[in-house]
Amino acid sequence: MQRWFQERPSPFPHEQEALDHVKALMPQAEPFRAWATFSFTAASGRTNECDLLILVPRGLFLVELKAHPGRLVNNGSTWNFHGPDRVRTINNPLHLTDLKSKELRARLTWAAQTSHTGVRIPFVSPAVFLSAPSLRSELDTVQQTNVYGRDDGASGLPRIWQDFLGLPPQRDSEAARRERLDLARALPDLMKRIGVRASTAHLSFGDGWNLAGRPLDGGPTWEDRLAIREQPIREEGRVRVYLVSLQATAETRNSVERAARREYQVLQGISHRGIAQAREFRDHQGGPAILFNHRASDLRLDAYLATHGASLTPDTRLELVRQIADALRYAHQRSLYHRALAARSVYVSCKPDGSSPVVRRRSSTGRYMARMVCLRTLNLKL
């Protein structure tokens, strides 16, 4: 009987090695089942890339894999991996994995109801597996929640199998065992019904642009992905997809498209280094989408401050405020407003050591909110 479902190996060796680490520890017994490197479309229209869904006696878990090496420290929810070659900065991946978990459970519940199996879908709980053998974690107790390391490593984290996936169930009555077995037998069909696939059709945009498998950022109605085009010259950008629900009416779909098109149109003719330039408008599998200027090395303002804030001089901080204020002035003179001006809606381009920062406001038309949000973030007394 098949218990490990993976259509094809991961294109990333470090990811496949992490999956193999878990697969080798998973018993060939009931109720164990696992799906690796798959995607599914949520009811919202968002296409979610997932690393590992695994059913074990303790429950059903969606596990995000990260293989960054080195010493891991955090500043709030910003994680910095101090590796041998550079510092890699990410936001705590548990938050986005939690969103995927909720959307996956909703789709599985729909599949169970429409197929009349009578199976109850339990909560799909999120977890993060940091799989680099050389990882040394110094995460604080809050950020370490639901984060695990290798069973054969010394990361300082709980072990992915012995301390988590391999634990006995919290309920082990006859009824609970029967419920787990029914779920294990039904899951393969339910996963097929929700369209689980290894397809990457949603990772293309326009003429030759390839989108990253994981979003840069996202919300209930939108997501941003890094875009790269190799020909005729290498270019980088950021694609914002305005998500359209699978159950959306024609009126709702038209409304989303009009809003996205309006945002693109009002940004035409806007030329300022502090405002992300909208380059292209196209339809995408998830909904209407806009391509913006962006660099892969750009950091969100909150992540930039968490990583480099301690080394910023007062002059550099004042320069950041001046750039933000200048972008706002330019936008307001042209009747452009921002409905959510905050650190997460501003990106920073800088040198590897954080010097020479240039801010770019992430576009979003609508009502303008207090600019003091960004000024407080910079810890300046004005």
Image (spheres, rainbow, N blue to C red):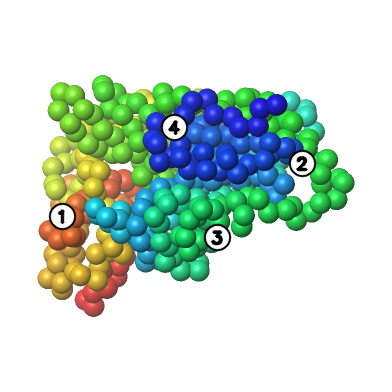
Q: Quadrant of the C terminus?
A: bottom left
Q: Which mark is residue 10?
A: 4
Q: Position of residue 207 (x, y in %)?
A: 26, 21
- Disc 2 is placed on an element classified as helix
The answer to whether residue 9 of the structure is visible from this angle is yes
Q: Amino acid at mark 1?
A: Lys
Residue marked by disc 1 = 351
Mark closest to the chain's N terminus, 2 or 1: 2
**In front: label 1 or label 4:** 4
Q: Is residue 141 left or right of residue 200?
A: right
- Count of picture labels: 4
Residue marked by disc 3 = 158
Mark 3 surroundings within 10 Å by alpha-carbon count, few (fewer than 14), some (14 through 19), many (20 or more): some
The Cα atoms of the two marked residues, 3 and 1, are separated by 35 Å
**In front: label 2 or label 1:** 2
Q: Amino acid at mark 2?
A: Arg
The Cα atoms of the two marked residues, 2 and 3, are separated by 25 Å
Mark closest to the chain's N terminus, 1 or 4: 4
Residue marked by disc 2 = 180
Name the foreground residue: 103 vs 307.
307
